Image: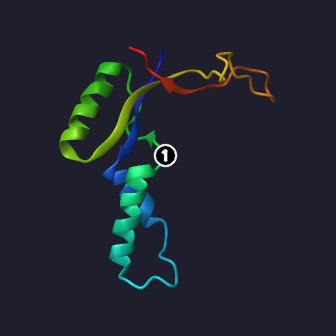
Amino acid sequence: MSAFCVFGMTDAIAKQSASKKSPPRDWKWSREAFYEEYQERIYKSGAHRQVSPAFDAPQFCREWIELAKSQMRTRGLKIMCRGQKLDKHGAPRINKKTKQPVIGWVPYGG
C-alpha cells in the first residue's frame, strides 16, 4: 500500500516558521512588522514541505488541495507519493551505508 500527501507552502506554515525566528537586535520597527515581513518572505521563497497528512489514495489529496485553496493562501501544491528516489541520470539512489534503495516522497504522475 502506498501513501500520498500534499507538498507546497501555505500561510499557516510560513507563519509558524517565522515565529521561530527572533528579530535582529538592530531592528528599528515593531516585532509584529518583522514577523509579517519575514512570514511573507518565507511564503514567497521558502522551500516546499509536507502540508497535509498522509492519505491512502490521491483523490483525498485532490480534495485536500481544493479545501486548502478555499481556506487559505497556498503556493505550489502538488501530490507526492512514497517511492524510490532517482538520481539526476534516472538511476535508483542507493544508501551508502545500508546498500538499499532510498525511499522517499516522489512526485505523483497520475
Quadrant of the image containing the C terminus: top left
Circle 1: element type = loop
Please state the horizontal and vertical placement of residue 42, each as a whole percent of the image. 42, 56
**Picture quarter containing residue 38?**
bottom left
Left or right of residue 101, residue 22 in this image: left
Identity of the residue drawn at 66% across and 23% down? 87
Badge count: 1
Left or right of residue 26, residue 86 in this image: right
Left or right of residue 107, residue 92 in this image: right
Please state the horizontal and vertical placement of residue 10, each as a whole percent of the image. 34, 47
Please state the horizontal and vertical placement of residue 56, each as a whole percent of the image. 38, 21
Indicate whether 18 appears above or below 92. Answer: below
Q: Which residue is mark 1?
A: 47
Indicate whether 43 appears above or below 29. Answer: above
Q: Residues within 10 Å of mark 1 (few under 14, many from 20)?
A: few
Identity of the residue drawn at 29% across and 20% down? 59
Disc 1 marks which amino acid? Ala
Identity of the residue drawn at 20% across and 45% down? 71
In this orientation, which residue lies closer to the viewer: 4 or 27? 27
**Picture quarter containing residue 8?**
top left
In this orientation, which residue lies closer to the viewer: 89 or 94? 89
Determine the residue located farthest toward the left in the rendered image. Answer: 70
Snapshot colouring: rainbow
Please state the horizontal and vertical placement of residue 54, each as a whole percent of the image. 41, 30
